[in-house]
Amino acid sequence: MAAKARRRFTAADWERRYGDDPFMLGVIRKVIVALHRDERIATWEGLQEALREQVAQHSNLHPGVERYVAHAVEQYLDAHDELAAQHGEVRFVAFDPAIGSQGREVTVWAPLYSSVDGVREVRRLRVNRARSSAEAHDHWATVAAFVAAGVGLRVPPVKIRIVEAGLYDGSTEVVFEGTPDEVRARYEAYGRPVIKSLVEVTDYRPGQSCQNCKLAGCCPSLEDLSGCLGQRRPGTHTRSVSAADLELYLKCPARWYLETACRLPAAGMASEASDRGRIIHRWLAQAHARGTRCTEQDVAPFGEAGVFMGTLTTEEYGKAREFLAAHARSCPLADGVEVVAVEPSVYGYDETADVVIASQPDLVYRGADGRIFVRETKTTTQMPADENDAFDRFFPVPWLMNIASTAKDAFGKSEMPPVVELEVITPEGARVFTWDLERDQDMVRMARAEVRQRAGSWIRDATWSPSPGSQCTWCPVRRWCPDAADVPGGVDGQPQVHDEPCAGLQMGVSD
Ligand code: SF4
Ligand code: SF4
Ligand SMILES: [Zn+2]
Protein backbone atom coordinates (compact mmCIF):
# COMPACT_ATOMS: atom_id res chain seq x y z
CA MET A 1 0.00 0.00 0.00
CA ALA A 2 1.29 3.45 -0.94
CA ALA A 3 1.31 4.85 2.60
CA LYS A 4 3.98 2.40 3.62
CA ALA A 5 6.40 3.76 1.05
CA ARG A 6 6.25 7.20 2.66
CA ARG A 7 8.01 7.80 5.91
CA ARG A 8 6.22 8.89 9.08
CA PHE A 9 2.85 8.54 7.38
CA THR A 10 -0.15 8.29 9.67
CA ALA A 11 -3.81 8.68 8.89
CA ALA A 12 -5.47 11.81 10.22
CA ASP A 13 -7.86 10.17 12.66
CA TRP A 14 -6.15 6.92 13.61
CA GLU A 15 -2.67 6.08 14.67
CA ARG A 16 -1.32 2.61 15.13
CA ARG A 17 -0.19 2.02 18.73
CA TYR A 18 3.08 0.18 19.17
CA GLY A 19 4.05 -1.98 22.13
CA ASP A 20 7.27 -1.55 24.07
CA ASP A 21 8.70 -4.90 23.03
CA PRO A 22 12.18 -4.23 21.75
CA PHE A 23 12.45 -4.77 18.02
CA MET A 24 14.50 -7.96 17.78
CA LEU A 25 16.47 -7.21 14.62
CA GLY A 26 17.14 -3.71 15.95
CA VAL A 27 18.69 -5.20 19.10
CA ILE A 28 20.80 -7.59 17.01
CA ARG A 29 22.06 -4.69 14.88
CA LYS A 30 23.06 -2.70 17.97
CA VAL A 31 24.92 -5.61 19.51
CA ILE A 32 26.72 -6.39 16.24
CA VAL A 33 28.03 -2.85 15.89
CA ALA A 34 29.14 -2.72 19.53
CA LEU A 35 31.03 -5.98 19.06
CA HIS A 36 32.65 -4.85 15.80
CA ARG A 37 34.34 -2.21 17.95
CA ASP A 38 35.20 -4.52 20.84
CA GLU A 39 38.68 -5.98 20.74
CA ARG A 40 37.77 -8.76 23.14
CA ILE A 41 36.01 -10.67 20.35
CA ALA A 42 39.39 -11.89 19.07
CA THR A 43 39.13 -14.79 21.55
CA TRP A 44 36.18 -17.08 22.21
CA GLU A 45 36.10 -16.24 25.93
CA GLY A 46 36.32 -12.52 25.17
CA LEU A 47 33.49 -12.77 22.67
CA GLN A 48 31.27 -14.59 25.16
CA GLU A 49 31.94 -11.96 27.82
CA ALA A 50 31.30 -9.03 25.48
CA LEU A 51 28.19 -10.71 24.11
CA ARG A 52 26.78 -11.31 27.59
CA GLU A 53 27.37 -7.67 28.51
CA GLN A 54 25.73 -6.35 25.38
CA VAL A 55 22.67 -8.60 25.50
CA ALA A 56 22.21 -7.79 29.20
CA GLN A 57 21.75 -4.13 28.27
CA HIS A 58 18.42 -5.08 26.66
CA SER A 59 16.79 -6.27 29.84
CA ASN A 60 13.21 -6.50 28.59
CA LEU A 61 13.87 -9.21 26.01
CA HIS A 62 11.80 -12.39 26.27
CA PRO A 63 14.11 -15.19 27.51
CA GLY A 64 13.59 -17.11 24.25
CA VAL A 65 14.41 -14.04 22.17
CA GLU A 66 17.46 -13.38 24.31
CA ARG A 67 18.75 -16.86 23.53
CA TYR A 68 18.17 -16.33 19.82
CA VAL A 69 19.81 -12.88 19.83
CA ALA A 70 23.03 -14.24 21.38
CA HIS A 71 23.06 -17.08 18.84
CA ALA A 72 22.33 -14.75 15.92
CA VAL A 73 25.10 -12.30 16.78
CA GLU A 74 27.69 -15.08 17.00
CA GLN A 75 26.53 -16.46 13.67
CA TYR A 76 26.70 -13.03 12.11
CA LEU A 77 30.25 -12.44 13.31
CA ASP A 78 31.26 -15.81 11.77
CA ALA A 79 29.60 -14.76 8.53
CA HIS A 80 31.45 -11.43 8.68
CA ASP A 81 34.82 -13.22 8.97
CA GLU A 82 33.94 -15.59 6.16
CA LEU A 83 32.97 -12.73 3.86
CA ALA A 84 36.25 -10.96 4.65
CA ALA A 85 38.19 -14.15 3.83
CA GLN A 86 36.37 -14.53 0.51
CA HIS A 87 36.10 -10.96 -0.70
CA GLY A 88 38.56 -8.88 1.36
CA GLU A 89 38.24 -6.73 4.49
CA VAL A 90 35.46 -4.18 4.83
CA ARG A 91 34.56 -2.03 7.80
CA PHE A 92 31.18 -0.95 9.14
CA VAL A 93 30.16 2.51 7.91
CA ALA A 94 26.57 3.12 8.97
CA PHE A 95 23.10 1.69 9.26
CA ASP A 96 20.30 2.51 6.86
CA PRO A 97 22.10 4.47 4.14
CA ALA A 98 19.81 6.94 2.36
CA ILE A 99 19.96 9.13 -0.72
CA GLY A 100 17.72 11.96 -1.93
CA SER A 101 16.39 14.99 -0.16
CA GLN A 102 13.78 15.29 2.56
CA GLY A 103 10.45 13.77 1.72
CA ARG A 104 11.80 11.96 -1.33
CA GLU A 105 14.44 9.82 0.30
CA VAL A 106 15.19 6.23 -0.55
CA THR A 107 16.50 4.38 2.49
CA VAL A 108 17.83 0.86 2.73
CA TRP A 109 17.20 -0.74 6.09
CA ALA A 110 20.52 -2.55 6.40
CA PRO A 111 24.14 -2.03 7.47
CA LEU A 112 26.61 -0.60 4.95
CA TYR A 113 30.27 -1.63 4.93
CA SER A 114 33.12 -0.36 2.74
CA SER A 115 36.72 -1.21 1.94
CA VAL A 116 39.64 1.20 1.61
CA ASP A 117 39.67 0.69 -2.17
CA GLY A 118 36.03 1.56 -2.87
CA VAL A 119 34.09 -1.68 -2.46
CA ARG A 120 30.72 -1.03 -0.82
CA GLU A 121 28.77 -3.88 0.69
CA VAL A 122 25.18 -3.87 1.95
CA ARG A 123 24.11 -6.80 4.11
CA ARG A 124 20.56 -7.95 4.30
CA LEU A 125 19.97 -9.74 7.60
CA ARG A 126 17.75 -12.81 7.54
CA VAL A 127 16.31 -14.25 10.74
CA ASN A 128 16.69 -17.69 9.20
CA ARG A 129 19.09 -18.68 6.40
CA ALA A 130 20.57 -16.56 3.61
CA ARG A 131 18.72 -16.93 0.33
CA SER A 132 20.31 -16.69 -3.07
CA SER A 133 18.63 -14.38 -5.53
CA ALA A 134 17.61 -16.30 -8.59
CA GLU A 135 15.85 -13.32 -10.15
CA ALA A 136 18.06 -11.04 -12.19
CA HIS A 137 16.03 -8.11 -10.90
CA ASP A 138 15.61 -8.79 -7.18
CA HIS A 139 14.03 -5.45 -6.34
CA TRP A 140 15.49 -5.05 -2.88
CA ALA A 141 19.05 -5.73 -4.08
CA THR A 142 18.55 -3.39 -7.04
CA VAL A 143 17.48 -0.48 -4.85
CA ALA A 144 20.04 -1.26 -2.12
CA ALA A 145 22.88 -1.25 -4.66
CA PHE A 146 21.68 2.05 -6.10
CA VAL A 147 21.57 3.67 -2.66
CA ALA A 148 24.99 2.23 -1.67
CA ALA A 149 26.52 3.60 -4.88
CA GLY A 150 25.01 7.05 -4.30
CA VAL A 151 25.97 7.59 -0.65
CA GLY A 152 28.68 10.25 -0.21
CA LEU A 153 31.81 8.65 1.25
CA ARG A 154 35.44 9.78 1.13
CA VAL A 155 36.45 6.97 -1.27
CA PRO A 156 34.30 6.86 -4.44
CA PRO A 157 32.62 3.53 -5.22
CA VAL A 158 34.26 1.09 -7.63
CA LYS A 159 32.22 -1.99 -6.87
CA ILE A 160 28.91 -2.60 -5.09
CA ARG A 161 28.09 -5.91 -3.48
CA ILE A 162 24.78 -6.97 -1.95
CA VAL A 163 25.03 -9.87 0.46
CA GLU A 164 22.48 -11.85 2.45
CA ALA A 165 23.54 -13.01 5.90
CA GLY A 166 21.60 -15.79 7.65
CA LEU A 167 21.48 -15.20 11.39
CA TYR A 168 20.38 -18.76 12.09
CA ASP A 169 23.33 -20.54 10.55
CA GLY A 170 25.85 -17.86 9.53
CA SER A 171 25.21 -18.60 5.85
CA THR A 172 26.04 -15.95 3.26
CA GLU A 173 24.99 -15.41 -0.34
CA VAL A 174 26.19 -12.70 -2.73
CA VAL A 175 22.99 -11.69 -4.51
CA PHE A 176 24.48 -8.94 -6.65
CA GLU A 177 27.88 -7.53 -7.52
CA GLY A 178 28.59 -4.84 -10.10
CA THR A 179 30.17 -1.54 -11.00
CA PRO A 180 28.37 1.77 -10.30
CA ASP A 181 27.40 1.97 -13.99
CA GLU A 182 25.86 -1.50 -13.89
CA VAL A 183 24.05 -0.57 -10.69
CA ARG A 184 22.53 2.56 -12.27
CA ALA A 185 21.44 0.70 -15.41
CA ARG A 186 19.78 -2.02 -13.35
CA TYR A 187 18.03 0.53 -11.14
CA GLU A 188 16.60 2.41 -14.16
CA ALA A 189 15.32 -0.86 -15.63
CA TYR A 190 13.91 -2.57 -12.55
CA GLY A 191 14.12 -0.35 -9.46
CA ARG A 192 12.67 3.04 -10.39
CA PRO A 193 9.47 1.64 -11.94
CA VAL A 194 8.75 -0.34 -8.77
CA ILE A 195 9.31 2.63 -6.45
CA LYS A 196 7.10 4.76 -8.68
CA SER A 197 4.27 2.25 -8.61
CA LEU A 198 4.57 1.93 -4.80
CA VAL A 199 4.21 5.67 -4.33
CA GLU A 200 1.37 6.02 -6.82
CA VAL A 201 -0.77 3.09 -5.81
CA THR A 202 -4.13 4.27 -4.50
CA ASP A 203 -6.30 1.19 -4.20
CA TYR A 204 -6.79 -0.87 -1.05
CA ARG A 205 -6.32 -4.60 -1.34
CA PRO A 206 -6.72 -6.47 1.94
CA GLY A 207 -4.10 -9.15 2.44
CA GLN A 208 -1.36 -10.18 4.78
CA SER A 209 0.09 -6.66 4.96
CA CYS A 210 -3.08 -5.44 6.75
CA GLN A 211 -1.72 -7.06 9.89
CA ASN A 212 0.96 -4.41 10.34
CA CYS A 213 -0.60 -1.60 8.35
CA LYS A 214 -0.45 2.01 9.55
CA LEU A 215 -3.94 2.58 8.13
CA ALA A 216 -5.72 -0.53 9.40
CA GLY A 217 -7.90 1.41 11.86
CA CYS A 218 -9.35 3.66 9.18
CA CYS A 219 -9.05 1.53 6.05
CA PRO A 220 -12.35 1.41 4.13
CA SER A 221 -11.54 -2.07 2.79
CA LEU A 222 -11.51 -3.83 6.14
CA GLU A 223 -14.76 -5.24 7.52
CA ASP A 224 -16.10 -3.37 10.52
CA LEU A 225 -15.76 -6.00 13.24
CA SER A 226 -16.10 -3.70 16.24
CA GLY A 227 -16.85 -5.73 19.33
CA CYS A 228 -16.00 -9.04 17.66
CA LEU A 229 -13.43 -10.04 20.28
CA GLY A 230 -15.80 -9.14 23.10
CA GLN A 231 -13.31 -6.86 24.85
CA ARG A 232 -14.32 -3.74 26.77
CA ARG A 233 -11.09 -1.90 26.05
CA PRO A 234 -8.01 -2.18 23.86
CA GLY A 235 -4.91 -4.09 24.90
CA THR A 236 -1.41 -2.71 25.24
CA HIS A 237 -1.02 -1.91 21.54
CA THR A 238 -2.57 -2.46 18.12
CA ARG A 239 -2.43 -6.18 17.39
CA SER A 240 -3.63 -8.63 14.77
CA VAL A 241 -5.05 -12.07 15.34
CA SER A 242 -6.42 -15.14 13.59
CA ALA A 243 -7.96 -18.38 14.86
CA ALA A 244 -4.58 -20.08 14.52
CA ASP A 245 -3.02 -17.47 16.81
CA LEU A 246 -5.51 -18.05 19.59
CA GLU A 247 -5.31 -21.81 19.17
CA LEU A 248 -1.52 -21.75 19.48
CA TYR A 249 -1.64 -19.22 22.32
CA LEU A 250 -3.81 -21.56 24.36
CA LYS A 251 -1.22 -24.33 24.01
CA CYS A 252 1.65 -22.13 25.11
CA PRO A 253 1.89 -18.31 25.11
CA ALA A 254 5.69 -18.44 24.81
CA ARG A 255 5.45 -20.65 21.74
CA TRP A 256 2.97 -18.25 20.12
CA TYR A 257 5.25 -15.32 20.81
CA LEU A 258 8.48 -16.94 19.60
CA GLU A 259 6.99 -18.73 16.61
CA THR A 260 4.38 -16.29 15.37
CA ALA A 261 5.19 -12.83 16.69
CA CYS A 262 9.00 -13.06 16.47
CA ARG A 263 9.08 -15.67 13.69
CA LEU A 264 12.18 -17.31 15.08
CA PRO A 265 13.63 -20.15 13.03
CA ALA A 266 11.45 -23.17 13.72
CA ALA A 267 12.37 -26.81 13.48
CA GLY A 268 10.35 -28.83 10.98
CA MET A 269 8.15 -30.60 13.51
CA ALA A 270 5.08 -30.84 11.27
CA SER A 271 2.85 -33.60 12.56
CA GLU A 272 1.23 -36.27 10.45
CA ALA A 273 -2.10 -34.53 11.08
CA SER A 274 -0.99 -31.16 9.74
CA ASP A 275 0.88 -32.65 6.75
CA ARG A 276 -2.16 -34.65 5.76
CA GLY A 277 -4.40 -31.62 6.25
CA ARG A 278 -2.23 -29.46 3.99
CA ILE A 279 -2.36 -31.97 1.14
CA ILE A 280 -6.13 -32.40 1.40
CA HIS A 281 -6.76 -28.66 1.58
CA ARG A 282 -4.65 -28.08 -1.52
CA TRP A 283 -6.66 -30.64 -3.44
CA LEU A 284 -10.00 -29.28 -2.20
CA ALA A 285 -9.07 -25.69 -3.09
CA GLN A 286 -8.05 -26.70 -6.61
CA ALA A 287 -11.07 -28.94 -7.10
CA HIS A 288 -13.53 -26.29 -5.86
CA ALA A 289 -11.93 -23.57 -7.97
CA ARG A 290 -13.48 -25.46 -10.92
CA GLY A 291 -16.87 -24.39 -9.53
CA THR A 292 -18.38 -27.84 -9.91
CA ARG A 293 -19.17 -30.70 -7.57
CA CYS A 294 -16.43 -33.23 -6.74
CA THR A 295 -17.32 -36.58 -8.25
CA GLU A 296 -16.45 -40.21 -7.61
CA GLN A 297 -14.51 -40.17 -10.84
CA ASP A 298 -12.35 -37.28 -9.53
CA VAL A 299 -11.18 -39.47 -6.66
CA ALA A 300 -10.86 -42.81 -8.47
CA PRO A 301 -7.67 -44.86 -7.93
CA PHE A 302 -4.60 -43.25 -9.45
CA GLY A 303 -4.22 -44.07 -13.14
CA GLU A 304 -7.93 -44.43 -13.91
CA ALA A 305 -9.46 -42.13 -16.50
CA GLY A 306 -10.79 -38.77 -15.21
CA VAL A 307 -8.92 -38.70 -11.88
CA PHE A 308 -8.43 -35.12 -10.67
CA MET A 309 -4.94 -34.78 -9.20
CA GLY A 310 -4.59 -30.99 -9.03
CA THR A 311 -0.97 -30.39 -8.11
CA LEU A 312 -0.72 -33.46 -5.87
CA THR A 313 2.08 -35.93 -6.50
CA THR A 314 1.20 -39.58 -6.88
CA GLU A 315 2.40 -40.22 -3.35
CA GLU A 316 0.38 -37.35 -1.89
CA TYR A 317 -2.71 -38.46 -3.78
CA GLY A 318 -2.23 -41.98 -2.42
CA LYS A 319 -2.05 -40.63 1.16
CA ALA A 320 -5.11 -38.40 0.75
CA ARG A 321 -7.37 -40.48 -1.47
CA GLU A 322 -9.52 -42.09 1.23
CA PHE A 323 -10.19 -38.66 2.72
CA LEU A 324 -10.95 -37.12 -0.67
CA ALA A 325 -13.35 -39.92 -1.56
CA ALA A 326 -15.14 -39.29 1.74
CA HIS A 327 -15.39 -35.58 0.87
CA ALA A 328 -16.72 -36.26 -2.63
CA ARG A 329 -19.78 -37.88 -1.06
CA SER A 330 -20.55 -34.70 0.91
CA CYS A 331 -19.33 -32.05 -1.54
CA PRO A 332 -21.74 -29.12 -1.25
CA LEU A 333 -21.44 -27.87 -4.83
CA ALA A 334 -24.69 -29.31 -6.10
CA ASP A 335 -26.70 -27.83 -8.98
CA GLY A 336 -27.81 -24.28 -8.23
CA VAL A 337 -24.97 -23.73 -5.76
CA GLU A 338 -22.48 -21.01 -6.61
CA VAL A 339 -18.88 -20.83 -5.37
CA VAL A 340 -18.38 -17.34 -3.89
CA ALA A 341 -14.71 -17.79 -2.96
CA VAL A 342 -12.19 -20.53 -2.29
CA GLU A 343 -10.02 -19.90 0.79
CA PRO A 344 -10.81 -16.15 0.87
CA SER A 345 -8.68 -14.03 3.22
CA VAL A 346 -11.16 -11.86 5.09
CA TYR A 347 -9.76 -8.99 7.15
CA GLY A 348 -11.59 -6.78 9.57
CA TYR A 349 -10.90 -4.32 12.37
CA ASP A 350 -12.29 -4.45 15.89
CA GLU A 351 -12.21 -0.85 17.01
CA THR A 352 -13.04 -1.59 20.65
CA ALA A 353 -10.14 -4.00 21.02
CA ASP A 354 -7.89 -2.19 18.50
CA VAL A 355 -7.17 -5.47 16.75
CA VAL A 356 -6.97 -6.43 13.07
CA ILE A 357 -8.86 -9.69 12.65
CA ALA A 358 -7.98 -12.21 9.99
CA SER A 359 -9.80 -15.31 8.86
CA GLN A 360 -9.63 -17.73 6.00
CA PRO A 361 -12.42 -20.27 5.72
CA ASP A 362 -11.89 -23.06 3.21
CA LEU A 363 -14.91 -22.35 1.06
CA VAL A 364 -17.69 -19.79 0.82
CA TYR A 365 -20.65 -20.68 -1.37
CA ARG A 366 -24.16 -19.45 -2.03
CA GLY A 367 -26.98 -21.93 -1.74
CA ALA A 368 -29.80 -22.13 -4.26
CA ASP A 369 -31.93 -19.89 -1.98
CA GLY A 370 -29.26 -17.15 -1.92
CA ARG A 371 -27.96 -17.94 1.54
CA ILE A 372 -24.21 -17.75 2.29
CA PHE A 373 -22.48 -20.87 3.64
CA VAL A 374 -19.05 -20.51 5.27
CA ARG A 375 -17.34 -23.87 5.35
CA GLU A 376 -14.28 -25.03 7.24
CA THR A 377 -12.90 -28.49 6.51
CA LYS A 378 -10.83 -30.46 9.00
CA THR A 379 -9.33 -33.91 8.91
CA THR A 380 -8.97 -36.13 11.93
CA THR A 381 -8.69 -39.74 12.99
CA GLN A 382 -11.71 -39.59 15.28
CA MET A 383 -15.06 -38.16 14.21
CA PRO A 384 -16.65 -35.74 16.75
CA ALA A 385 -19.61 -37.31 18.50
CA ASP A 386 -21.95 -34.40 17.79
CA GLU A 387 -22.19 -30.64 17.16
CA ASN A 388 -21.08 -29.80 20.69
CA ASP A 389 -18.00 -32.00 20.48
CA ALA A 390 -17.16 -30.49 17.06
CA PHE A 391 -17.61 -26.96 18.42
CA ASP A 392 -15.31 -27.69 21.38
CA ARG A 393 -12.58 -29.40 19.39
CA PHE A 394 -12.31 -27.10 16.37
CA PHE A 395 -11.80 -23.47 17.32
CA PRO A 396 -12.39 -22.12 13.77
CA VAL A 397 -16.09 -22.90 14.35
CA PRO A 398 -16.69 -20.35 17.15
CA TRP A 399 -14.23 -18.02 15.41
CA LEU A 400 -16.14 -17.95 12.11
CA MET A 401 -19.52 -17.83 13.88
CA ASN A 402 -18.34 -14.85 15.85
CA ILE A 403 -17.12 -12.95 12.79
CA ALA A 404 -20.25 -13.72 10.80
CA SER A 405 -22.52 -12.71 13.69
CA THR A 406 -20.60 -9.42 14.12
CA ALA A 407 -20.73 -8.56 10.41
CA LYS A 408 -23.42 -10.53 8.58
CA ASP A 409 -21.97 -9.90 5.13
CA ALA A 410 -18.29 -10.38 6.02
CA PHE A 411 -18.04 -13.46 3.80
CA GLY A 412 -20.60 -12.52 1.17
CA LYS A 413 -23.73 -10.38 0.81
CA SER A 414 -27.03 -12.00 1.62
CA GLU A 415 -30.45 -11.09 3.03
CA MET A 416 -30.17 -13.80 5.67
CA PRO A 417 -27.48 -14.47 8.28
CA PRO A 418 -24.99 -17.06 7.01
CA VAL A 419 -24.63 -20.71 7.96
CA VAL A 420 -21.29 -21.92 9.32
CA GLU A 421 -20.36 -25.47 8.43
CA LEU A 422 -17.63 -27.75 9.64
CA GLU A 423 -16.89 -30.70 7.41
CA VAL A 424 -14.89 -33.30 9.29
CA ILE A 425 -13.21 -35.97 7.21
CA THR A 426 -11.78 -39.24 8.48
CA PRO A 427 -10.61 -42.13 6.30
CA GLU A 428 -13.95 -43.83 6.98
CA GLY A 429 -16.23 -40.99 6.03
CA ALA A 430 -17.12 -37.33 6.15
CA ARG A 431 -19.73 -35.54 8.24
CA VAL A 432 -20.93 -31.97 8.04
CA PHE A 433 -21.83 -30.14 11.26
CA THR A 434 -23.96 -27.04 10.79
CA TRP A 435 -24.68 -23.89 12.78
CA ASP A 436 -27.41 -21.68 11.43
CA LEU A 437 -26.71 -18.18 12.72
CA GLU A 438 -30.36 -17.22 12.48
CA ARG A 439 -31.67 -20.12 14.51
CA ASP A 440 -28.76 -21.20 16.77
CA GLN A 441 -28.70 -18.12 19.02
CA ASP A 442 -27.49 -20.15 22.00
CA MET A 443 -24.54 -21.40 20.00
CA VAL A 444 -23.80 -17.85 18.83
CA ARG A 445 -23.67 -16.78 22.48
CA MET A 446 -21.35 -19.67 23.27
CA ALA A 447 -19.13 -18.74 20.33
CA ARG A 448 -18.90 -15.16 21.57
CA ALA A 449 -18.00 -16.34 25.07
CA GLU A 450 -15.34 -18.71 23.75
CA VAL A 451 -13.69 -16.03 21.61
CA ARG A 452 -14.00 -13.39 24.35
CA GLN A 453 -12.29 -15.63 26.85
CA ARG A 454 -9.43 -16.68 24.58
CA ALA A 455 -8.84 -13.18 23.24
CA GLY A 456 -9.07 -11.69 26.76
CA SER A 457 -5.92 -13.42 28.01
CA TRP A 458 -4.05 -12.89 24.74
CA ILE A 459 -4.81 -9.18 24.35
CA ARG A 460 -3.49 -8.29 27.80
CA ASP A 461 -0.45 -10.54 27.71
CA ALA A 462 2.90 -8.82 27.47
CA THR A 463 5.11 -11.45 29.09
CA TRP A 464 4.31 -14.60 27.11
CA SER A 465 4.97 -17.18 29.79
CA PRO A 466 5.91 -20.71 28.86
CA SER A 467 3.53 -23.64 29.47
CA PRO A 468 5.96 -26.53 29.62
CA GLY A 469 4.42 -29.96 29.15
CA SER A 470 4.19 -32.82 26.71
CA GLN A 471 3.67 -30.31 23.86
CA CYS A 472 7.32 -29.26 24.26
CA THR A 473 8.30 -32.53 22.56
CA TRP A 474 6.90 -31.28 19.25
CA CYS A 475 7.47 -27.57 19.78
CA PRO A 476 9.18 -26.06 16.71
CA VAL A 477 10.82 -23.29 18.76
CA ARG A 478 11.96 -25.55 21.57
CA ARG A 479 15.57 -24.77 20.75
CA TRP A 480 15.13 -21.14 21.84
CA CYS A 481 13.00 -21.83 24.90
CA PRO A 482 14.85 -21.99 28.24
CA ASP A 483 11.80 -23.65 29.85
CA ALA A 484 11.31 -26.57 27.46
CA ALA A 485 10.20 -29.64 29.40
CA ASP A 486 11.91 -32.97 28.94
CA VAL A 487 9.15 -35.49 28.56
CA PRO A 488 10.04 -39.15 28.89
CA GLY A 489 9.17 -41.06 25.72
CA GLY A 490 10.37 -38.30 23.37
CA VAL A 491 8.84 -37.88 19.96
CA ASP A 492 7.42 -41.41 19.96
CA GLY A 493 4.77 -40.49 22.48
CA GLN A 494 2.37 -39.10 19.87
CA PRO A 495 -1.06 -37.90 21.02
CA GLN A 496 -3.96 -40.31 20.65
CA VAL A 497 -6.32 -38.24 18.48
CA HIS A 498 -4.93 -36.52 15.40
CA ASP A 499 -7.10 -33.42 14.93
CA GLU A 500 -5.76 -31.18 12.23
CA PRO A 501 -4.58 -27.89 13.79
CA CYS A 502 -5.38 -24.45 12.37
CA ALA A 503 -3.05 -23.76 9.48
CA GLY A 504 -3.02 -20.00 10.01
CA LEU A 505 -2.75 -17.34 7.38
CA GLN A 506 0.31 -16.70 5.31
CA MET A 507 2.28 -14.13 7.26
CA GLY A 508 4.53 -11.45 5.85
CA VAL A 509 7.93 -12.95 5.27
CA SER A 510 10.26 -11.07 7.52
CA ASP A 511 13.10 -13.52 7.70
S1 SF4 B 1 -5.40 -2.19 6.04
FE1 SF4 B 1 -4.85 -3.58 4.36
S2 SF4 B 1 -6.06 -2.93 2.59
FE2 SF4 B 1 -6.11 -1.26 4.12
S3 SF4 B 1 -4.44 0.10 3.50
FE3 SF4 B 1 -3.60 -1.32 5.02
S4 SF4 B 1 -2.72 -3.03 3.82
FE4 SF4 B 1 -4.08 -1.86 2.42
S1 SF4 C 1 9.31 -25.67 24.47
FE1 SF4 C 1 7.41 -25.94 25.64
S2 SF4 C 1 7.34 -24.21 27.08
FE2 SF4 C 1 8.87 -23.73 25.50
S3 SF4 C 1 7.74 -22.55 23.95
FE3 SF4 C 1 7.69 -24.68 23.30
S4 SF4 C 1 5.77 -25.51 24.14
FE4 SF4 C 1 6.22 -23.60 25.24
ZN1 LIG D 1 -15.92 -30.83 -3.28
Image (cartoon, rainbow, N blue to C red):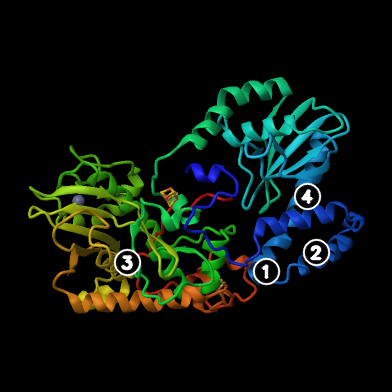
Q: Is residue 509 left or right of residue 381?
A: right
- Labels 3 and 1: the sequence-earlier one: 1
Can residue 429 be seen here? no
Q: Which mark is residue 164?
A: none
Q: How busy is the neighbourhood of tag 1: few (under 14 within 10 Å), some, or many (20 plus)?
A: some
Cα–Cα gap, marks 4 and 3: 44 Å
Q: Amino acid at mark 4?
A: Asp
At 71% from the left and 49% from the top, the residue drawn is 170
Secondary structure, mark 4, is: helix
Relative to 74, say whether 92 is above or below: above
Secondary structure, mark 3, is: helix
Farthest residue, direction right:
39
Q: Position of residue 26 (x, y in %)?
A: 69, 56
Cα–Cα gap, marks 4 and 1: 23 Å
Cα–Cα gap, marks 1 and 2: 12 Å
Cα–Cα gap, marks 3 and 2: 43 Å
- Labels 4 and 1: the sequence-earlier one: 1
Residue position for label 1: 61
Residue position for label 2: 54
Q: Position of residue 498 (x, y in %)?
A: 35, 69
Residue position for label 4: 78
User: Is there CB contact under 8 Å for labels 4 and 3?
Assistant: no
Residue position for label 3: 396
Q: Is residue 67 left or right of residue 42?
A: left
The picture quadrant where one finds residue 179 is top right
Of circles 4 and 3, the one toward us is: 3
At 24% from the left and 71% from the top, the residue drawn is 383
Can residue 30 be seen here? yes
Q: Is mark 2 within 8 Å of ligand 2?
A: no
Secondary structure, mark 1, is: loop
